[in-house]
């Protein structure tokens, strides 16, 4: 395969030798198109046979499970926190304090019962005013619904109402506890993308608890009891008509803000990476957003697009994770490619690494003393990374495979190298975090293969130079690459969701981000 036969399966194709045209990053270039069949002039198939083959191909692709470029999962903790904040932004407690309790009690019963209406009128004549004096929303609960792909959101309401009556000089106070419930499900539309929505918001009388805070005279207590009985059917109706629209609007705003957050480009040197939502799903009590990814250049133009792939993306996420972000391996490699483009590094070995210059000369003497004597103090090493490092992501261990071409010049005046080596190398990759930044670091370098590509001297076994060449790359190439990775990759979703730090880890074919609890 290319100039280095036997290169590992799954690694990117090697670039051509210096001077050749370097292909760009690949994104499923080798996969056949998802639709369409073609006929070649050499072998034409009959219409019936062609239709059958196309049908079988379409059926096979339809049954394939496609994996998105990335998956953002919101757990119940994040949903609770974000929705609570949006309810505050929408002044939900103020809405509760403004509930028209007295007006709701004045509504006539569904059936016309004269005795009941007369009783209500008698009670209402004894009330000067009745209103909520304080209100709060307690901790929300996010639970799986009894229906498939639905989430039940419970919003506990805590209120104190005051009643003023001529029967007593003090205010009669009630403590009221109620609960609004709503379902979150994915709503699909022919005119737009599917999205999670909050619907069927209501409050039942069974969740309502009303008690008198202070007992007064028998007459006042009797009046208060009658008022509480009238509030039992009235309060759930007010919650549904007055508060539920606010809850639905708060959830819509929460999801809209989340989409804006997802779409914020991640800066990668001169360019960036941007996620776009494909489709949401609901599993148990989490909302999962399937994402596509786009690599942008310095002008914001899309250079590579990562859609759904047939590559499996099954990454176990801790059950108690507030949220998680899973990024597919090819997207991670595109990020690394942007930070570490192919480059050429030239050093005067005797000036920069004098000990290694002496070791190289000593190693060459074992091959040919005459050749070793040609090296002077301006001996030059030119290293070219033929392709960007390619990360192979596996649980607990990640390798960065690189293809390197190294030219050794006897002096800096020579136009032809003494010899050229082709190297297949790999390094351990360490993932860690600093705040909301994904940090990468390459540790160590080892050879899978070293091959003599060109030689201005006799043919020799390049394995004899393996140790010293490894030390040169360790001292020259890795520091250069790690310096470019040192700034890290900012992932603003961590801080935006209220977390200071996150934990990155490698999985099978992906990286996983979860916040520190």
Image: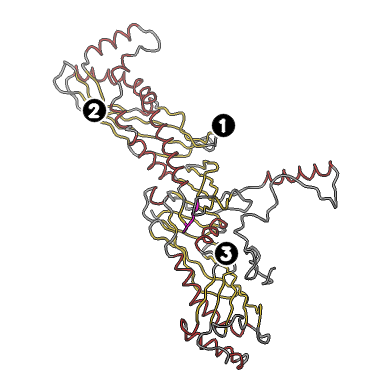
Residue 246 versus residue 302 in the image, above or below: above
Q: Local crowd at mark 2 within 10 Å, few (<14), some, or many (≥20)?
A: some
Where residue 89 appears, as percent x and y from the top left, is: 33, 36
State the residue position of label 3.
390
Q: Residue furthest top?
A: 114
Q: Which residues are magenta?
A: 268-273
User: Is the N terminus in the top left, top right, bottom left or bottom right quadrant?
Assistant: bottom right
Spatial separation of the CA atoms under disc 1 and disc 3: 40 Å
* 338 shown above or below 307: below
Q: Nearer the viewer, mark 2 or mark 1?
A: 1
Which mark is on residue 133? Answer: 2
Q: Is residue 256 magenta?
A: no
Q: Earlier in the sequence, mark 1 or mark 3?
A: 1
Residue marked by disc 1: 191
Which quadrant of the view contains residue 161? top left
Q: Is tag 2's residue or tag 1's residue first in the polypeptide sequence?
A: 2
Would you say 494 lies left or right of 52 here?
Answer: left
Q: CA distance from mark 2 to mark 1?
A: 45 Å
Q: Quadrant of residue 140?
A: top left
Answer whether labels 2 and 3 touch (C-beta < 8 Å). Answer: no
Query: Which residue is drawn at the image coordinates 29% and 26% (left, top)?
Result: 210
User: Please, is residue 401 above or below residue 92 in the view?
Assistant: below
Alpha carbon distance from label 2 to label 3: 64 Å
Residue 272 magenta-highlighted:
yes
Task: Single out the residue that lies furthest toward the bottom.
Answer: 369
Identify the mark nearer the N-term, 2 or 3.
2
């Amino acid at each position: 395969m290319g100039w280095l036969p036997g290169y590992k399966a799954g690694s990117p194709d090697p670039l051509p030798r210096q001077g050749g045209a370097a292909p760009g990053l690949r994104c499923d270039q080798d996969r056949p198109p998802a639709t369409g069949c073609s006929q070649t002039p050499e072998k034409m198939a009959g219409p019936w046979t062609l239709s059958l083959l196309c049908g079988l191909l379409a059926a096979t692709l339809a049954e394939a499970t496609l994996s998105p470029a990335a998956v953002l999962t919101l757990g119940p903790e994040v949903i609770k926190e974000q929705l609570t904040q949006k309810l505050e932004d929408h002044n939900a407690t103020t809405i509760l304090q403004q509930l028209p309790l007295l007006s709701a009690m004045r509504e006539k019963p569904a059936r016309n019962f004269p005795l009941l209406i007369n009783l209500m009128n008698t009670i209402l004549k004894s009330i000067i005013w009745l209103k909520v004096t304080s209100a709060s929303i307690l901790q929300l609960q996010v639970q799986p619904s009894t229906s498939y792909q639905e989430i039940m959101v419970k919003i506990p309401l805590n209120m104190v109402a005051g009643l003023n009556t001529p029967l007593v000089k003090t205010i009669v106070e009630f403590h009221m506890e109620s609960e609004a419930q709503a379902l979150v499900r994915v709503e699909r539309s022919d005119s737009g993308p599917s999205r999670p929505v909050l619907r069927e918001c209501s409050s039942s009388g069974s969740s309502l608890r009303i008690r008198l805070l202070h007992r007064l005279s028998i007459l006042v207590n009797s009046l208060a009891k009658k008022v509480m009985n009238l509030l039992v059917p009235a309060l759930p109706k007010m919650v549904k008509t007055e508060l539920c629209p606010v809850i639905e609007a708060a959830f819509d705003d929460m999801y809209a803000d989340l989409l804006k957050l997802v779409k914020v480009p991640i800066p990668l040197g001169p360019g960036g990476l941007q996620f776009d939502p494909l489709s949401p799903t609901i599993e148990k009590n989490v909302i999962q957003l399937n994402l596509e990814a786009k690599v942008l250049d310095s002008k914001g133009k899309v250079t590579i697009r990562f859609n759904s792939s047939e590559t499996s993306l099954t990454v176990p996420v801790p059950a108690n994770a507030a949220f998680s972000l899973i990024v597919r391996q090819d997207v991670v490699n595109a990020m690394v490619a942007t930070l570490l483009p192919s480059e050429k590094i030239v050093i005067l070995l005797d000036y920069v690494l004098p000990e290694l210059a002496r070791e190289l000369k000593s190693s060459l003497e074992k091959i040919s003393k005459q050749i070793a004597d040609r090296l002077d103090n301006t001996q030059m090493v030119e290293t070219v990374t033929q392709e960007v490092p390619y990360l192979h992501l596996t649980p607990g261990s990640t390798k960065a495979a690189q293809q390197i071409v190294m030219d050794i010049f006897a002096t800096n005046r020579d136009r032809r190298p003494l010899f050229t080596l082709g190297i297949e190398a790999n390094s351990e990759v360490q993932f860690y975090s600093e705040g909301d930044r994904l940090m990468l670091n390459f540790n160590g370098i080892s050879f899978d293969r070293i091959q003599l590509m060109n030689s201005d001297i006799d043919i020799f076994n390049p394995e004899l130079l393996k140790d010293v060449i490894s030390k040169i790359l360790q001292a020259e190439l890795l520091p250069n690459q790690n310096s470019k990775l040192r700034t890290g990759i900012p992932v603003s979703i961590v801080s935006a969701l209220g977390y200071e730090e996150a934990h990155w880890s490698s999985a099978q074919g992906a990286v996983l981000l979860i916040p520190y609890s």
